[in-house]
Amino acid sequence: MTTRLGIRGKLFLTSLGMFLLVGLLFELYLTKAMRSWVESFSVEELVREAKSLAVALEGYHGKELHDPTALPALIYQLGEAGKKRITLIDPQGKVLADSGVDPATVSTLDNHNSRPEVIAAREKGLGLSQRFSDTLKASMLYAATPLNGYGGQWILRLQVSLAQVDETISHVRLVLFIAGILGLVTAMLVSAILAHVTTRRLRQMVHQAMAIADGHQVGLLETSSTDEISGIAGSFNRVSHSLANVVATLAQEKHRFETVLDQMSEPVFTLDERNRVSLINRAALMLIQRLDSEEALGLPLTMMLPVPEIEAMLQEVNNEAEVSISFSLGKGEEVRRLSAHAKPLTNRGGTLIVLHDITEMYRLEKMRREFVANVSHELRTPVSVLMANSEVLLDGAIHDPQAGPSLLQALHRNANRLSLIINKLLELSKIDSKKYALKLETINLLQESAVWLLDMRPRLSEKNITLEVAISADHLLLADPHALGHVMINLLDNALKYTPNNGQIHLRSQAMPHSLIIEVEDNGPGIPPEHWPRIFERFYRVDAGRARISGGAGLGLAIVKNFVEAMGGRVGVGAGKQQGALFWITLPIPDPIR
């Protein structure tokens, strides 16, 4: 886990590091300078003492001549008193006395004429040297000067251990170290206070910037002082105000855009460079059967619309080409026909896809093609008979007493059939174009049914079919009398066609809270359930026994549906109680009088 270092910490560490670096450099420089100064001071002091001692010893010349041991004894006394090592060397380089060595062992010391300080003293009058002493096993500082008046170049040499220099420097370094620690603590306090004061408003800026990034509204920063941070705070306030205005404008535009997008009836998708959904509207969510856009964002479009046409379209769009396709979605009765238009978004990458539900258009186009084909088929037979029979009659068959009347009867039947088809097509056309003016009024169903039954009795008698009527005398409904007559005659005529001789047809009504149900049931061959959804389409024929028996044009039930729906009702079909078909309609009833 990593720890973030703030501005205050960085300033503190930077200041502390600078203090430590300056302190270290100062300590190294001061140590070197101190050593140089102490060594120089020690040399000067040692030279001064050597010369002073030499002057003092030159006056001792007389005693030395009377007592040869007097001068060495004096050397030992002076060395012990001054805490200095004093060596007396004769002209031949022999050590006569050495305060740092036991007098009994002086005679064993090496000849000192080869010592650098001794050579320099005899040549220049003063010799200085710094080296490691084999006798004392320590680094020493030597100063040598000649003694005049002894009949030759006698040398007086003083030496001091450099350990004293190191001790002095160590003591000074200890003092400096303590002073440095105190200075460091002071510097740390000053750095902490300075960093806190300096970064307080910077931290406020950071917190406000983070709040703005999270979409929160923030106040203005304090700009009472005239330093650079106040200038930055003022600029930040201006930027914050401008950014707030921009964010508010963008939020408003986004809200408008999302509102317009969600109000669109067409599904809309926008995809990123990897063909994953980045924006989706409400219509698209309904299409892919998802409740929330969060569920769809980031998913591949091919996962939500798994059809080969979509994959092929995305491949073409990736080549920066606009593509339009159509495809089917769903299975069975829920299949939908959709068209898709895809356009690459060149400004920021990705793709815009707009879908259109053309299911109804596709269905109507299919119906149109079927209607044209069915009309052509239905009209071809009577027209062919009319043309063939008229040609035969024109060729002379009209004078044939046997063939002439038969051909004329066929012409009459097919002319009637052709007229029936044309009239029904015209009725459907009027209903579709809203040109059929309906006048809804309160109708007593039992009284109105007497008119239809009167027209149906001759045909019922021909097939010996029994029509059972179960309609209450108080059943009222809102309908157009002419349209209702068309509906009921078509339903009864349809039942009459498919009811075998000596069969039964039931006409009954049933009152509901807000509507009246009218049922027509026969005991013919019936209609298989798979044909029920399309039985009211124009020219639709059932391929079972009813189609073989029927000689109609397939328009009667379409007229029934259109008239009933125009009067605010519904139609349906089902199975009868005795194998036959059951057709029913519902129509509204008048409001009760209060």
Image (cartoon, rainbow, N blue to C red):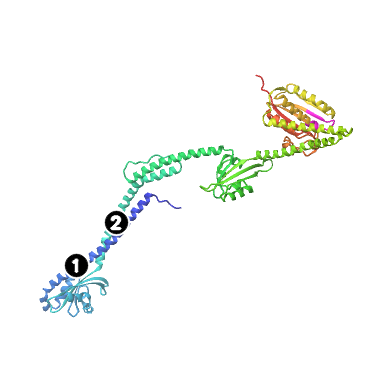
The x and y percentages for residue 284 are: 59, 41
Residue 484 placement (x, y as % from top left): 73, 26
* Residue farthest toward the top in the current orientation of the protein: 594
The one nearer the camera, 236 or 449, is 449
Query: Which one is earlier in the sequence, the residue at label 1 or at label 2?
Result: 1
Amino acid type for the residue under numbered disc 1: Glu
Q: CA distance from mark 1 to mark 2?
A: 31 Å
Q: Quadrant of the C terminus?
A: top right
In the image, 229 versus 21, the foreground residue is 229
Which of the 4 quarters of the picture holds residue 371?
Answer: top right
Q: Which residues are magenta?
A: 494-506
Mark 1 near mark 2, Cβ–Cβ under 8 Å?
Answer: no
The residue at which mark 2 appears reads as 180
Residue 522, image x, y percentages: 79, 31
Point 26% across, 67% down: residue: 163
Q: Which residue is mark 1?
A: 44
